[in-house]
Image (cartoon, rainbow, N blue to C red):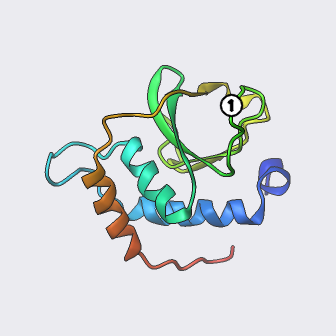
Amino acid sequence: MIGYAANEIFSDGDHVLWLLARRFVEAAPDYDKETKTLIRCHELARAVGELLGLRVCDGKYGFVEHSWLWLSEPEPEIARYNMPKILDVYVPGSVPQVQLVDTHSGLCHRYLPDGSRTDVSERIVGELVGLFKTVRWELVRS
């Protein structure tokens, strides 16, 4: 079955971006080889966003510090009622990890935009971007 969101809310272009993001995330390592720490959403979102041409938003997912991607450019003053759709490459506590999120459905209450992060590792973002550039994209129609 193909649900309402897949049919009515997200465009074919949104689905292509989601498929590409999934390919990138599948290729990403679990840990940063230098620091031996888990790859965080903050670096992962920035690397995927750079390759897909999407803007990163830093904020909170519930009470968790989080970063995600806007599928279109947000209004200058982001209100809880006019946020763009979201491509989240590392949804906390959820499977699948990479998800498209409709912000107009009332289900987006968990995403709270906030100021930009200052602790992002540009080295990790750069390494991820380099890795993702080597990923082959083979989209299979189902």
- Residue 92 seen in the figure: no
Q: Give the percent coordinates (x, y) of residue 88.
A: 55, 46
Q: Horizontal placement of 116 versus 84: left or right?
A: left
Q: Give the percent coordinates (x, y) of residue 2.
A: 79, 57
Q: Is residue 23 above or below residue 86?
A: below
Q: Residue at x 67, y 25 (%)?
A: 109
Q: Nearer the viewer, residue 74 or 137?
A: 74
Q: Residue at x 68, y 76 (%)?
A: 141
Q: Is residue 112 above or below residue 32?
A: above
Q: Residue at x 17, y 54 (%)?
A: 33
- Residue 28 seen in the figure: yes
Q: Is residue 22 above or below residue 84?
A: below
Q: Which residue, given by chain and number where applicable, does mark 1 sit on?
A: 78
Q: Is residue 137 above or below residue 125?
A: below
Q: Residues within 10 Å of mark 1 (few under 14, many from 20)?
A: few
Q: Give the percent coordinates (x, y) of residue 55.
A: 56, 50
Q: Horizontal placement of 107 versus 125: left or right?
A: right
> What element does badge 1 sit on?
loop
Q: Residue at x 30, y 35 (%)?
A: 119
Picture quadrant of residue 142? bottom right
Q: Horizontal placement of 125 versus 46: left or right?
A: left
